Image (cartoon, rainbow, N blue to C red):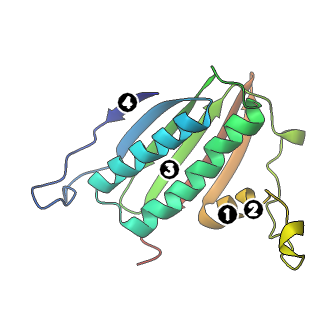
Amino acid sequence: MNDEAADVAAPDEAGAAPADTGPRALRKTVGSTAEEVRQTLINVSEELGRLGVNQPDQDAIEVVLAECMNNVVEHAYCQRPGRKFELKLLLTADSLFCRLEDHGQAMPGLMMPAGGLLDLSPELDDLPEGGFGWFLIRQLTSDLRYARANGLNTLSFQIPLGQSE
């Protein structure tokens, strides 16, 4: 994994993020394995914590980024290691703007899955293994967009901050 942090300020001695900081950009190049996704999530969470993002917001961000990055690994790259994708983040006072870019397979029909809530009434053994990810992504983000151009998939969205305080 290759990291690049732009304008990421260190917290003060009390551990708080600097009060006069503007938007902070973060860019990660992530390998197409579950291990690299996991390490990226850890690194992003640590950096957001240093910047003063509260724990409930960090938790929501982790859920969304985990679902999105795992979708790239599992579906766009069909779990083939050795590929890379980009994660670009821009942290502002009230939102985290996110963009993922990969050169994997396109989403079916060039559209994001609907992500509706699944029927949870069947017996536990009959519940589907997956299908909750897009529901969670849609619930925790705004301005969710997908595009494909010149072999590049781009998924972008915004995660509002401070909603759970």
The numbered disc on residue 132 is 2
> Mark 2 touching mark 4, by CB under 8 A?
no
The residue beneath circle 3 is: 97
Mark 4 surroundings within 10 Å by alpha-carbon count, few (fewer than 14), some (14 through 19), many (20 or more): few
**Is residue 42 left or right of 123 when viewed as pictured?**
left
For badge 4, the amino acid type reads Glu
For badge 2, the amino acid type reads Phe
Q: Nearer the viewer, residue 125 or 48?
A: 125
The residue beneath circle 1 is: 136
Disc 2 from disc 4: Cα separation = 31 Å
Q: Nearer the viewer, residue 145 or 4?
A: 4
- The structure residue drawn at horizontal position 62% and vertical position 42%, both measured from the top left corner, is 69
Disc 4 from disc 1: Cα separation = 28 Å
Question: Residue reaching furthest left?
Answer: 13
> Mark 2 touching mark 3, by CB under 8 A?
no
Question: Residue reaching furthest front?
Answer: 125
> Mark 4 touching mark 3, by CB under 8 A?
no
Residue 87 location in percent, x, y? 53, 37
Q: In what element is the residue under mark 1?
A: helix
Q: Quadrant of residue 24?
A: top left
The residue beneath circle 4 is: 4
Circle nearer the N terminus (2, 3): 3
The numbered disc on residue 161 is none
> Mark 3 touching mark 1, by CB under 8 A?
no
Q: In what element is the residue under mark 2?
A: loop
Q: In what element is the residue under mark 3?
A: strand
